[in-house]
Image (tube, grey):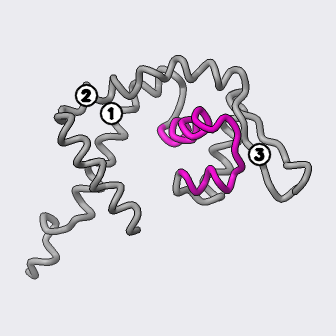
Amino acid sequence: MYEELKLDNQLCFPLYSCAKGVVGKYKPFLDELDLTYTQYIALLVLWEKRKTNVKTLGEALSLDSGTLTPLLKKLQEKGLISRERDPEDERNLTVSLTPEGEKLELKAREIPSRISRCIDLSKEDSIALYGILRKLMAKL
């Protein structure tokens, strides 16, 4: 067997495994809010910006419109967001929080600290890992 084809020598596998594990840690907290992880990260952007267009939201989340459209429809069905065509440019779809979406932000505030308690990394390791992952994201 070629060394470069061993699973233990692949960068992709620990990244995949860790991503899956970390997202799994979010599940019980997000279940309390009736959200999926992808809905949660979309709301994170909206809680920060309050209003944005679909293209900007997709870029922030690295999601294409085929994934984003059903996600936004579901959030709208839950009453958390509204979607409206930009009157100045009908091609642009604007997404904004509803009052219900804004209320959910208060309930979600504890999730980051709850997650950090579930993932036993020192603050220094967390900062270093975050920096490395951001560098990798920029290169990809």
Task: Tell me residue 95's x, y (percent).
Answer: 73, 42
Q: Is residue 35 magenta?
A: no
The answer to which of marks 3 and 2 sits earlier in the sequence is 3
Mark nearest the camera among 1 and 2 is 2
Say left or right for 85 vs 120: right
Task: Tell me residue 101's x, y (percent).
Answer: 65, 25
The answer to which of marks 1 and 2 sits earlier in the sequence is 1
Give 78 or 90, whichever is nearer the viewer: 90
Residue at x-position 52% and y-position 57%: 62
The answer to which of marks 3 and 1 sits earlier in the sequence is 1
Which residue bears the numbered disc 3?
94
Which residue bears the numbered disc 2?
118
Asked whether disc 1 touches disc 2, contact meaning CB atoms under 8 Å apart, the reply is yes
**Crowd class of label 3 (few under 14; some 14 to 19; many from 20; radius 10 Å):** some
Asked whether disc 3 touches disc 1, contact meaning CB atoms under 8 Å apart, the reply is no
Give 13 or 41, whichever is nearer the viewer: 41
Mark nearest the camera among 3 and 2 is 3
Q: Which residues fall within the magenta stretch? A: 37-60
Which residue bears the numbered disc 1?
25
